[in-house]
Image (spheres, rainbow, N blue to C red):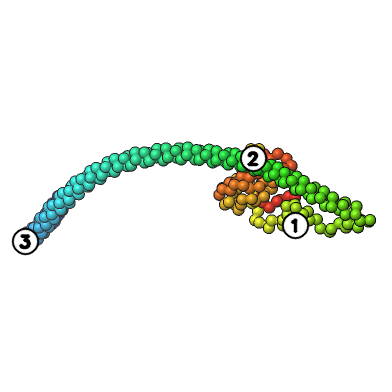
Amino acid sequence: MNILTKICIVVLVILVLSACSAFLAYVVSAENYRQSLQEEKEAMAAADTKIRRLEDTVRATNDQKIAADDESNRLRAQNAQMISERLKQFAELSAGHSGMTGRIEELAGKTQGLTDAQLAFTAIRQEMWNELVKVQADRMQLTVEKLALKEDVRRKEEENADFRSKNQRLEDQVREREVTIAVLTTELERLREAPMGAAIGMPSEVMMPAGAPGEGRVIQLVVPSEAAGQAKIAGRILAIRNNIAGINVGSAHGVKKSMRMVITRGAQFIGYLDIETVEPGDSAGIVTDKKLEPQVGDQVSYPSPVKAGD
């Protein structure tokens, strides 16, 4: 029920009430008919005025309703336009999302390719590392073999030098004997001519006889001093062949050529290792003065952690 219908109902109710009032007034006082009629006419005029006012109000209300309907239609049109624009934007976003999905899938494919390449590179690097370890082991073996050969050559040279030294000593002894024989022969001739021999005292120093190499030279023995203390160096034997041992410490750890390191196994003294070849990360040398056979894994250190007689 709209407003106009309500207004009409109200108007009708007012008219009915007015008519009832007029009728009652006419019935009660017939003598005042004219006055009542006049009053009724005035009431009817007032009612007509009220009805016209009500009609004006209804028309104004209808105009407002029409304006409200126009505003509602305009708002519906704007809402429809906004919905159309939102749908268009959603379609554009959906197309952009599809494009982004394609890019993401493409990037995922590239990422998988990079992952496969990285795995291949890791495998190649591991293979190269294994080759490097093998090469280092071969180099250590070659170093040990080289030192073994060098030790063999040194032994041969020492044997030759010892042989030459023995030969020289024998020659010196022969010359000394010849000189001694000549001196004794001269002394014997002198003693034969003299009635008594003079006592010959022993010299306090031993000198080379006349005619011998180094005649009149005094030989002194010099005891080398102990090596100065150095920082602790510790390592292990990696490889050993004959008396040549390779260890896992080198110049980067303070190892130097001709250094004498001590070989131990727990608290046992094994022998000494005279360093011959030094690399940054490893070195090798000759085992000397060994009490037991050295093994791979034995400890090497400098200076000595134990005494040789322990």
**Closer to the camera in the image, 248 or 163:** 163
Q: Secondary structure at mark 1?
A: loop
Mark 1 and mark 3 lie on one chain; the one further toward the N terminus is 3
Residue 144 falls in image quadrant:
top right
Q: Mark 1 = which residue?
A: 217
User: Which residue lies under the disc numbered 2?
Assistant: 152
Q: Residues within 10 Å of mark 2 (few under 14, many from 20)?
A: few
Q: Is residue 309 left or right of residue 96?
A: right
Dot 1 crowding, Cα within 10 Å, few <14, some 14–19, many 20+: few
As displayed, is residue 45 above or below residue 297?
below
Q: What distance separates the C-alpha of mark 2 from that of mark 1? A: 35 Å
Judge from the rendering whether residue 60 lies leftward or rightward of residue 270; answer left or right.
left
**Residue 250 visible:** yes
Where 180 falls versus 142 (above or below)?
Answer: below
Q: Secondary structure at mark 3?
A: helix
Q: Residue at x 61, y 39 (%)?
A: 149
Question: Is residue 24 visible to the viewer in this orientation of the structure?
Answer: no
For this orientation, the residue located farthest to the front is 193
Q: Which mark is nearer the camera, 3 or 2?
A: 2
| Residue depicted at 77% across the width and 54% down the height | 210
Residue type for callout 2: Asp
Secondary structure of the residue carrying tag 2 is helix
Q: Residue at x 88, y 51 (%)?
A: 188
The residue carrying mark 3 is 38
Q: Camera-side residue: 107 or 308?
A: 308
Residue plotted at (11% across, 55% down): 63
Image height of 149 relative to 216, above or below: above
